[in-house]
Image: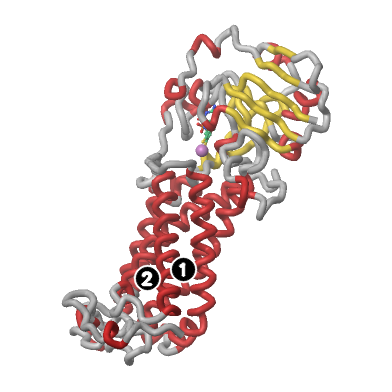
Amino acid sequence: MVRVPRSLSSVPPPPGPFRRSFWRSPIRGPWLTAFFGSILLVGVTLMFATGLLSYDAYNPGLGHNATDRGHHLSHVFLFDWPTHPYWLYRVTQGVHVTLGLVLIPVLLGKLWSVIPKLFEWPPVRSLAHMIERLSLLLLVGGAVFEFVTGIMNIQYFYRFPGSFYVLHLYGAWVFMAAFVVHVGMKFPKMVRALRSRRMRDVLRTDVAHTEPEPPDPDHLVSPSPARPTMSRRGAIGLVGASSLTVFVVTAGQSIGGWTRHLAVLAPRDADISSGPNGFQINKRAAQVGIKPEETGASWRLTLHGPPGSHPIVMSRAQLLAMPQHTAHLPIACVEGWSSGNQKWTGIPLRDLATMAGVPDPSSLYVQSLQKGGEFSRVTLRGNQVMNLDSLLALTVNDVDLSMDHGFPARIIVPANPGVHNTKWVSQLTFMA
Ligand SMILES: Nc1nc2c(c(=O)[nH]1)N[C@H]1C(S)=C(S)[C@@H](COP(=O)(O)O)O[C@H]1N2
Ligand SMILES: [Mo]
């Protein structure tokens, strides 16, 4: 093992946080760290799983999708995202986003519990120690990066160079690699620490009776503990209450019903007054440059079939004269919100595929009247086209779609991420 010369490691730490005696909380120690760590172990694993599912639901690899630039890693985990059950994406993405928000206080608690390690002295003791510290940098940096990019995205305040999908996915792989190494190294310690005290005793101990843990080899326990100002029970309660508060003010956006009114921290633009069309709007027509004259009587839908075949051009009246199908489906956005089930009526995409001369398409390329922007086009997979409930919707809740919900026609597909339910559709190209 490479050793830092003795002379260097015997340099006394500078005053301040590099001195172990600077950190005096008597509740800091292996038990509290293990307690928060065990919650993160479960929570982060679930977030990684639901995040990968979300990525898969975007049909990466099919052309023109927002994620198709993230190629290299996108093929690590690929199966055809199903259309059953229709609420699948609503649940996986609701869990992903809500859990991410609820875990913030736990993450902060965990980081607080290990903060003296950030100021270890000497900064590097040996090669092994250096590698361990670098892996911790990836772990903490990765976690902070994933939480920050995720939160900025759902708050419509994403300011990073590069696509959110790609950065958040790559960041997740880096973070998870560091996470697996970290858990691998710390798991036995975590179990031992959790066993060192009974939860029942922790919950019964008030501030006056709060004692520091015995000194530990990792130096989490303060060498000069101050008088306790908070019990472990209090710290857990504080974090728990914060997480619960975050849950109450956000989860309603995905759960729906009366809980939607509680989701004050997750407001979404909606015209409640507009009756049947009164549910969340992601982007308004005016915002993306859709002009009323484009959606009026002159609007046409163009269906493209096999190469060389003549495109079929249809007016909205002609579409309305075709056999209509109704499906009750939610819009479930990657940002975690869901509109809840709405009653959509229109023409099954598979009927349009048959009309276009591609009765069993492998994919469908959808284009919007909207010019440019990642959301103006999408490629859906064959299994999504073939579900009877996959529609080119003309009405919602028995009235015409409003301009903001995609009039004259929009895509709605069961279990599809919201962003792939393209609004203001103008062209459909079915690929054999
Ligand atoms: N053409 C187009 N379609 C679009 C979008 C868009 O910006 N442009 N936004 C998408 C996103 S991100 C979502 S979540 C849903 C939201 O549909 P809604 O606004 O009707 O609720 O529409 C999708 N379809
Ligand atoms: Mo969305």
Neighbour class for label 1 at 10 Å: few (<14), some, many (≥20)? Answer: some
Q: Which amino acid does label 1 sit on?
A: Leu
Q: Residue furthest left?
A: 15
- Residue positioned 47% across, 84% down in the render: 189
**3D distance between C-alphas at marks 2 and 1:** 9 Å
Which quadrant: the C terminus?
Answer: top right
Image disc number at residue 40: 1
Query: Mark 2 touching mark 1, by CB under 8 A?
Result: yes
- Residue positioned 45% across, 51% down in the render: 251
- Residue positioned 63% across, 48% down in the render: 56
Image disc number at residue 110: 2
Q: Where is residue 68 in the image (x, y as percent from the top left)?
A: 61, 40
Snapshot quadrant of residue 309: top right
Q: Which amino acid does label 2 sit on?
A: Lys
Snapshot quadrant of residue 57: top right
Task: Please name whichever residue, 372 or 292, is drawn nearer the observer in this view of the structure.
Answer: 372
